[in-house]
Image (tube, rainbow, N blue to C red):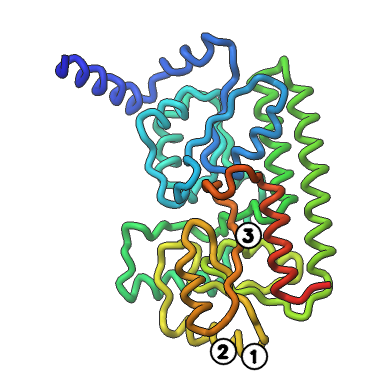
Amino acid sequence: MRLMSGLVALSSLALLASGCSAFSDDTKADGKTTVAAAFYPLAYVSDRVTEGTGTDVQLLTQPGAEPHDLELTVKETAELASADLVVYESGFQPAVDDAVEQNAGGATLDATKVVDPLPFDESAEEHEEHAGEEGHDEEHDHDHGELDPHFWQDPLRMADLGDAVADKLAGVDADHAERYRSNAAALRTDLEALDAEYTAGLGACTRDTIVVSHDAFGYLEKYGLHVASIVGLTPDAEPTGATLGKLKELIRTEGITTVFSEPLKPALGENFAKDLGLRNGVLDPIEGLTDATADEDYLTLMRTNLEAIVAANGCR
C-alpha cells in the first residue's frame, strides 16, 4: 500500500513538472471555468468580475499566510496548472512565477503588464541594501526588481486590472463575455468612488507624512501623502540604525504622533512606537486576509485604512 501511494505521488509530481494538461481535462469535465489568483487583491478582482457566471476562483495564497513567502503545495500547483486563467504578478512571488512558466496550461494574466506599476522609492532600495549589509537573512530577501508591486493601494489601478481580467475571461468563456465586462464596469464604479473618498479625505491634513512598517503604501502618495517606512519592500528585513535615526528626526520635525504596524507582522511598528512613546496604529497592506479580517474585503479594508490615516494626520 505504501509503495502504491508513493508511486501515485511521484506520478502527480511528474505531471506537474512536465506541464501536463491532464488537470485541465478534469476541470472541464464539470463545465466550469476556473481562475487561479495568486494572492488576495487579485482574487478580489477576479471574484468581482466573475460574479454570477459560475466561474470558480481559487486563491493560491491561503488566508493568514505571508504572500511574499509563498511556496506552492502540490495541490495549489495542480490548481494553477488546470486553471483556464491564472492571474498573478510577476516579480512578487517567485514560486508562482516558476509555476506559471512550467505548469500553466491555460491563459495567463500578469498584472504588471496592465496596471503600469511605479518604480519603487530609492529610499526603499536603500533600506534593502543596508539590510543585506547587516546580515539580513537572504532566504527571505526577495528581489522585486525595480517596480513597487503594491499597486492595489491605488483603486484605479485595480479597476484597470478588472478590465483586463474581464477581457481575458471573455476570450476563454465567450458565453459569459458580456457579464464579465459588465461586472468589471460595476467594479470600476466602486473603485472610482473609493479613489474619490481618498482624494477628499486626505485633501486637507495637519500632517502629510505617515510612518509605516514596510514600504507597501507608496501608491498612496498620489493623494499628497509622504510615506516613510521602517524597512523597505521586504517585510522580513531588519531596520538599520541609520534608518531609525532618520525616522526619529522626521517624526520630531513633522510632529508625527502615530507609527503604523500591520496585521501579519505587527511587532516592528509596535516596538518602534513604544520606544518613542508614540501611538501605534494599524494599516493593512491588504496583501491577504487574516482570521481577524475574514469578514472584510478590499473595499472595507481600504476605507478602514483611510480612517486611520485621517485620524493620525489630523485631516478634516
**Residue 122 in the image: x percent, y percent?**
55, 72
**Residue 27 in the image: x percent, y percent?**
50, 16
Q: Which residue is drawn at 55% across and 36% down?
A: 37
Asked which secondary structure carries label 2, the reply is helix
Q: Mark 1 points at which residue?
A: 253
Q: Which residue is drawn at 65% across and 45% down?
A: 296
Relative placement, left or right, of 36 versus 209 is left
Asked which secondary structure carries label 1, the reply is helix
Q: Earlier in the sequence, mark 1 or mark 3?
A: 3
**Residue 119 in the image: x percent, y percent?**
59, 62
Mark-to-mark CA distance, 3 and 2: 27 Å
Q: Mark 2 points at which residue?
A: 249
Asked which secondary structure carries label 3, the reply is loop
Q: Mark 3 points at which residue?
A: 118
Residue 308, numbered circle? none
Image quarter for residue 218?
bottom right
- The answer to whether the residue labelled 2 contacts the one labelled 1, judged by CB atoms less than 8 Å apart, is yes
